[in-house]
Image (cartoon, rainbow, N blue to C red):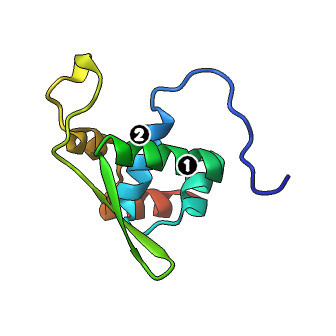
């Protein structure tokens, strides 16, 4: 089936929820289809993750026409007790590439 990412086996450092949140932080107007491709998830999985993040208060969206604009709550603290008091903004600072880094990375690739 075209458009479905290849399955991943094994463990990773970053959860799918964090990947989706980082993709949205990088582009608040990103489409679910583009998040899915970027994160190597299905569109259904991305929609479920966005719903989880909205229900937990980490994310909200505004619909204008056919486009969603997402807004992240940067001061909302992370859920795990080991990160108690750590705001989501600190996590995103590790995961989201700023424009300068993205340009340098793209230029360095063949």
Q: Alpha-carbon distance for marks 1 and 2?
A: 11 Å
What residue do we see at 26% from left, 45% from top? 93
Furthest toward the front, the residue is: 55
Q: Which mark is residue 46?
A: 1
Name the side, left or right, on which 17 lies relative to 70: right
Q: Nearer the viewer, residue 76 or 8?
A: 76
What residue do we see at 21% from left, 40% from top? 90
Name the side, left or right, on which 98 lies relative to 16: left
Q: Nearer the viewer, residue 105 or 93?
A: 93
Which image quadrant is residue 100 in?
A: bottom left
Relative height, residue 13 to residue 93 (above, below):
above
Q: Earlier in the sequence, mark 1 or mark 2?
A: 2
What residue do we see at 41% from left, 39% from top? 18
Give the secondary structure at mark 1. Answer: helix
Name the side, left or right, on which 94 lies relative to 53: left
Query: Residue 36 appears at what percent x and percent y?
Result: 59, 53
Query: Residue 45 appears at what percent x and percent y?
Result: 60, 44
The C terminus, quarter of image: bottom right
- Neighbour class for label 2 at 10 Å: few (<14), some, many (≥20)? some
Furthest toward the top, the residue is: 82
Relative height, residue 15 to residue 62 (above, below):
above
Residue pointed to by mark 2: 18
Nearest to the eye among marks 1 and 2: give it.
1
Relative height, residue 53 to residue 29 (above, below):
above
Query: Residue 34 appears at what percent x and percent y?
Result: 57, 62
Query: Residue 60 appears at what percent x and percent y?
Result: 32, 57
Relative height, residue 92 to residue 99 (above, below):
above
- Neighbour class for label 1 at 10 Å: few (<14), some, many (≥20)? many
What residue do we see at 17% from left, 31% from top? 86
Q: How many marks?
A: 2
Name the side, left or right, on which 95 lies relative to 20: left
């Amino acid at each position: 089936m075209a458009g479905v990412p290849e399955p991943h086996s094994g463990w990773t450092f970053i959860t799918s929820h964090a990947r989706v949140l980082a993709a949205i932080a990088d582009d608040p107007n990103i489409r679910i289809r583009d998040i899915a491709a970027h994160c190597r998830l299905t569109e259904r999985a991305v929609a479920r993750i966005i719903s989880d993040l909205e229900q937990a208060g980490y994310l909200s969206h505004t619909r204008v026409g056919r486009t969603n604009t997402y807004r992240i709550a940067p001061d909302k603290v992370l859920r795990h007790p080991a990160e108690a008091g750590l705001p989501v903004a600190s996590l995103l600072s590790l995961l989201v590439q700023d424009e300068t880094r993205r340009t340098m990375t793209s230029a360095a690739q063949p």
